[in-house]
Amino acid sequence: MTTSGTDACVREIIELAGRLHARTHAHYEAKVAETGLTMPQARALMLLSAGEAMSMRALSDLLGANPSNVTITVDRLQGRGLVERDEVVADRRVRAVRLSQEGAQLKRRLEAGLLAGNPTATRLSTTEQETLRDLLRRLVDER
């Protein structure tokens, strides 16, 4: 393939990836809206588990957000009964957060909704989905 052909192909890949991202994001936003959560609340909910507590700092790092903003998000989730806060026994200054039973149920419903009718999967066979997944893994692998 010539350089100009390669450039045209890369441009098209970038454009298609952007369009796929937009579709997937719109689907995600619609499913999140059905739960009554905000996008930051949904992102936090999806990172937490009922069985394991996560420090607020770790959650902030995973979200790439300012700890004070994450505190507000967690406050709102706690107000809805979706998360619980615990003191870390080894360091009482540290607060950890985990999903409540109700939060775990909502997370499962959200995950199911995100999979149902997801535009990244509905037009591809299982084999095509696996091929796409493998190619995307190669592209995002930072090693």
Image: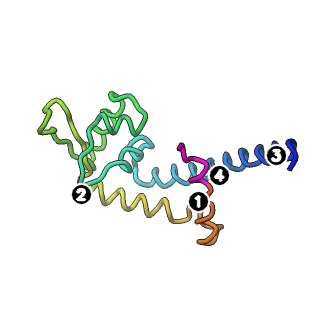
Instruction: Work out how far the residue at label 2 is from the one at label 3, CA to CA, in angstroms.
Output: 51 Å
Which SS class for mark 4? helix
Residue type pointed to by label 2: Gln
Question: How crowded is the residue under tag 2: few (<14 C-alpha within 10 Å), some, or many (20+)?
Answer: some
Q: Which residue is mark 3?
A: 6
Highlighted magenta segment, given as a residue range:
136-143
Between 26 and 4, the one lying in front of the other is 4
Q: Give residue 134's mark.
A: 1
Residue behind mark 4 = 20
Relative to 124, is 98 above or below? above
Q: Please tell me whether mark 4 or mark 2 is closer to you in this view.
A: 4
Q: Residues within 10 Å of mark 4 (few under 14, many from 20)?
A: some
Distance between the alpha carbons at the discs numbered 4 and 1: 17 Å
- Where residue 129 appears, x then y in whole percent? 60, 65
Total numbered labels = 4
Q: Amino acid at mark 4?
A: Leu
Where is residue 94 shown, x and y percent of the image?
20, 33
Residue on which the image places disc 2: 101
Q: Are marks 4 and 1 in contact (CB under 8 Å)?
A: no
Distance between mark 1 and mark 2 Cα atoms: 34 Å
Residues tagged 4 and 2 counted as in contact (Cβ below 8 A): no
Please tell me which residue is depicted at 21% across the width and 46% down the height of the picture: 84
- Across and down, in percent, residue 12 comes to 77, 47
- Is tag 4's residue or tag 1's residue first in the polypeptide sequence? 4
Q: Give left or right: position of 34 versus 52.
A: right
Say what amino acid the circle numbered 1 marks: Asp
Q: Earlier in the sequence, mark 4 or mark 3?
A: 3
Q: Earlier in the sequence, mark 2 or mark 3?
A: 3
In this rendering, the label closer to the viewer, 4 or 3: 3
Foreground: disc 2 or disc 3: 3
In this rendering, is residue 128 above or below 71? below
